[in-house]
Image (spheres, rainbow, N blue to C red):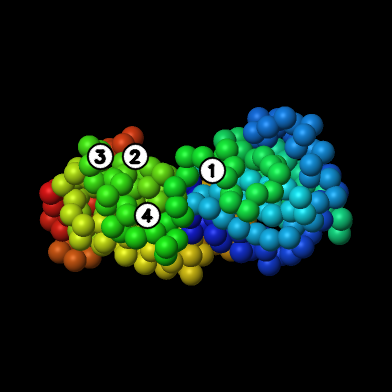
Amino acid sequence: MPELPEVETVVQTLKAQLGHATFTHVDVLWDNIIAQDLEEFKTRIQNQTIQNYGRKGKYLLFELDDYMLIAHLRMEGKFYIQMPEEPINKHIHVIFHLKDGRELRYHDTRKFGRMSIRPKRQDLNYEELANTGPDALDENVTSLELYHKWHQKRIRLKHMLLDQRFLAGIGNIYADEICFSCQLHPATLVTHLSKKDFENICFHTRRILKGAVQAGGTTIRSYTSSLGVHGRFQLELKVHQRVHQPCICCQTPIKKIQLEGRGTYFCPMCQKRK
């Protein structure tokens, strides 16, 4: 599943390859991808030019002349830039026709992705982002703010990291890596975390995500940006998907458990439950 670094890679690649492209019209081949009235979506996209590209958490934001195109890739959504004469794969569900003759095609094997076009707002106060907290790379958010907001919640650390209201953009892969870098067991109750723990969580979250962005994201299973940029951060994963392999710090075999409904990887020696 694409997380913040993968989405950022897609955003930057689209920006480089599309630039200020103009949409002439759109064909929707699977209606459920569109999270609003379908005809409204089709009408709003017509003759709109992309003015800027952005992201909040796992959401892609395409700033148009008058609207904001908001897309969430969910499990396996991908974008392809192709020519009209190229075959249309059976998993292509939305085709944006560009003024220069190219097509921006949305591919989604599981059909979980969602898109909408809303009137443009400077405050990004869109209903799609209502349950999204500050972006995980937002340097204006302090560890002390997060501590006061979250430390009284009787939830586990892994739960908090995956909650997009905490820091938007963290998914299962990076949550495991953050816990390992902080030397915290993922099942630790948030109420047992100190201010110093929150400081470490903020520091390592940004360090790991920035490193992954620079490396082009993490390719796990079938996900790639599908625009010629492939993730390489998987070469640097310390615990995720390394079950039974020796910990890089203490050589203890990495364990895997189910936590919050997700496969969770950790070192039982380095990561103690507080």
Pick whichever of labels 3 and 2 is earlier in the sequence. 3
Q: Are marks 4 and 3 in contact (CB under 8 Å)?
A: no
Pick whichever of labels 4 and 3 is earlier in the sequence. 3
| Residue in front for this viewpoint, 98 or 218 | 98
**Residue at position x 79%, y 59% from top?**
21
Quickly name the residue at label 4: 174
Q: Are marks 2 and 1 in contact (CB under 8 Å)?
A: no
- Tag 2, which secondary structure? strand
Looking at the rendered structure, the kind of residue marked 1 is Leu
Pick whichever of labels 2 and 1 is earlier in the sequence. 1
- The correct choice, above or below, for 212 with respect to 80 in the image is below
Pick whichever of labels 4 and 1 is earlier in the sequence. 1
Quickly name the residue at label 2: 262
Q: Alpha carbon of mark 2 to alpha carbon of mark 1: how far?
A: 23 Å
Q: Alpha carbon of mark 4 to alpha carbon of mark 1: how far?
A: 21 Å
Crowd class of label 1 (few under 14; some 14 to 19; many from 20; radius 10 Å)? some
- The correct choice, above or below, for 104 with respect to 263 in the image is below
Q: Quadrant of residue 182?
A: bottom left
Q: Quadrant of residue 82?
A: bottom right
The disc at residue 233 is none
Looking at the rendered structure, the kind of residue marked 3 is Lys
- Tag 1, which secondary structure? helix
Pick whichever of labels 2 and 4 is earlier in the sequence. 4
Crowd class of label 2 (few under 14; some 14 to 19; many from 20; radius 10 Å)? few
Looking at the rendered structure, the kind of residue marked 4 is Tyr
